[in-house]
Amino acid sequence: MSDFADLIARAVHPGMTREEREAVYTVVRDAVLKLQDREGTSPADPRFAYQQHVIEETIRDVEADLARHEALRKLEQALASQTAAHASQRRR
């Protein structure tokens, strides 16, 4: 399943809006539903529910990674600003 997670992670990036990422996730969900239909997987089949769960879990993990990336970017930006402010105060 790591290939699946990699595929989703490559399809989205931190520069995308939430709506753009959600559009990608919708395409992924629809594609999996088509595959399940092609394979004849019934919604009553436990594999159906498991696959749906894995999709949602993967999307959640990708969103968490993006949130971590954004938080680290903001921390780095804040540190750079703080360092610059401290350096300018020391020069006075």
Image (tube, rainbow, N blue to C red):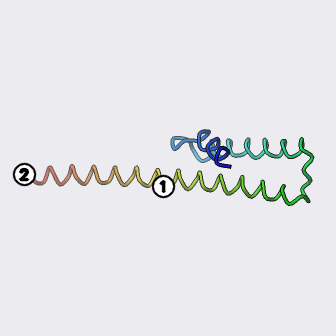
The answer to whether residue 75 is above or below residue 6 is below
The residue type indicated by label 2 comes to Arg
Residue found at x 48% / y 55%: 68
Tally of numbered discs:
2
* Quadrant of the image occupied by residue 86: bottom left
**Which residue is at the front of the view, 29 or 47?**
47
Task: Determine the residue located farthest toward the top in the rendered image.
Answer: 11
The x, y position of residue 1, in whole percent, is: 68, 49
The x, y position of residue 87, in whole percent, is: 15, 51
- For label 2, count other residues whose C-alpha is less than 10 Å away and answer few (under 14), some (14-19) or many (20+): few
Residue found at x 44% / y 55%: 71
Mark closest to the chain's N terminus, 2 or 1: 1
The x, y position of residue 11, in whole percent, is: 62, 39
The x, y position of residue 74, in whole percent, is: 39, 52
The residue type indicated by label 1 comes to Arg
Residue found at x 84% / y 42%: 34
Task: Determine the residue located farthest toward the left in the rendered image.
Answer: 92
Question: What residue sits right under mark 2 in the picture?
Answer: 92
Residue found at x 34% / y 51%: 76
